[in-house]
Image (spheres, rainbow, N blue to C red):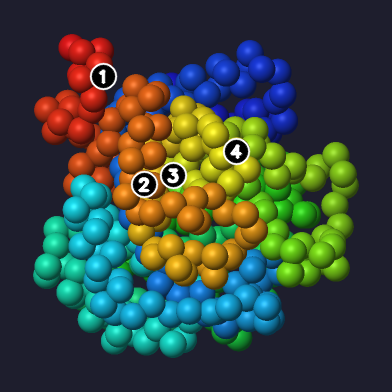
Amino acid sequence: MTELTKLDLLDALRESRPDRLQALYGRADAVRKENVGDAVHLRGLIEVSSHCVRQCMYCGLRQGNRDLPRYRMAREEIEECARQAVRLGYGTVVMQAGEDDGLTAEWIAEIVRWIKSETALAVTLSLGERSQAELRMWRSAGADRYLLRFETSDKNLFHAIHPDRYANGPDRLTLLKQLKDLGYEAGGGVMVGIPGQSFESLANDIFTFRALDLDMIGIGPYIAHAATPLGTGALRPAIDPFEQVPNSEEMVYKMIALTRIVCPTANIPSTTALATINKVDGRKLGLKAGANVVMPNLTPVKYRSMYEIYPAKACIEESATDCNQCLRGQIHSIGRVAGQGPGGKGAMETVARVMADAPPHLVQLQR
């Protein structure tokens, strides 16, 4: 397969002709099938805390949003979510939070140890920028993966929308390299359509994914919360309007497809943010453009409205059981199958393992 150049990426990112876009999505889907198979991995999301010490300019969890009620889940609640993940047949749980110093290193380590001793689940942590000592402790406790989205590889734009947490601390790209050195499978990702984001910046993001050799790459639309400087328009990064990337659904599909082609063995989710801007078909279209992961929500429903990174998030009132059934139905409706096991980078599932999860008409189709 011919390697994509930067010019190829820029041309594709600016492409709007339906036939050319369908050809791009078809190529990405073929690369997906060849490298990671037809399994779609379901990774159960547990949003353990909405407290955050950061002041990111777009995120509803920012410390300055005084109108948002905050919560921190009890250990027993998190453990019950892990049990539910097992009952629902998931291979991974993802513990996600704002950058909450109330989640102490030892407390998180104890929960990770419990999950690893009581279940066969892989454990992914997504707790923001933490110290090397904390990250090392969690890895020693058994955490398998760490997600740290860098949102944009443009350093100037990043710093415009993410005030530093630590003076002179490592940037997120450096932290991702350090995570890999600690033995984690590392995940990163970007937002599409950030005010001030250029097409060239997006192309550079894709090459950054490849250079970091990421296990998981999350790509979603930029959606600002109204109670933030970007959401109110108080912050407006300067950029030529012709160069400004739109935060459209189509741009996200293009980025997923191009990322799949450039990083063929990575795990790429079809995100909740996509389902938020297209509640009917967003996740399915992301899967058709090259994604192979979805993240059903295990967070107790009573907490979900308080984890308001952006408004009107999809599925906040759906029970974990209903979410599971809905996502499995969407997966089967496009001729794919739900994966089994932890589903690490490049994992290929055999037909014998996954067909047990498929409905009879799909089993017939595969024969």
N-terminal of the pair, mark 3 or mark 4, is 3
Residue 322 marker? 2
- Name the residue that disc number 1 marks: 362
Place of residue 296 in the rendered image (x, y in percent of width and height, measured from the top left): 38, 50
Does dot 3 land on a helix, a strand or a loop?
loop
The CA span between labels 3 and 2 is 20 Å
The CA span between labels 4 and 2 is 19 Å
Where 221 falls versus 183 (above or below)? above
Q: Residue at x 43, y 80 (%)?
A: 72
- Name the residue that disc number 3 marks: 269
> What amino acid does circle 1 point to?
Leu
Q: Nearer the viewer, mark 3 or mark 2?
A: 2
Q: Residue at x 25, y 16 (%)?
A: 361
Q: Residue at x 36, y 59 (%)?
A: 298
Place of residue 11 in the rendered image (x, y in percent of width and height, measured from the top left): 69, 28
Q: Quadrant of residue 199?
A: top right
N-terminal of the pair, mark 4 or mark 1, is 4
Place of residue 242 in the rendered image (x, y in percent of width and height, measured from the top left): 85, 39
Note whether residue 265 is visible. Answer: no
Does dot 1 land on a helix, a strand or a loop?
helix
> What amino acid does circle 2 point to?
Asp
Dot 2 crowding, Cα within 10 Å, few <14, some 14–19, many 20+? some
> What amino acid does circle 3 point to?
Pro
Does dot 4 land on a helix, a strand or a loop?
loop
N-terminal of the pair, mark 3 or mark 1, is 3
Labels 4 & 2 near each other (Cβ < 8 A): no
Residue 278 marker? 4
The CA span between labels 3 and 4 is 15 Å
Left or right of 80 in this view: 57: right
The CA span between labels 2 and 1 is 21 Å
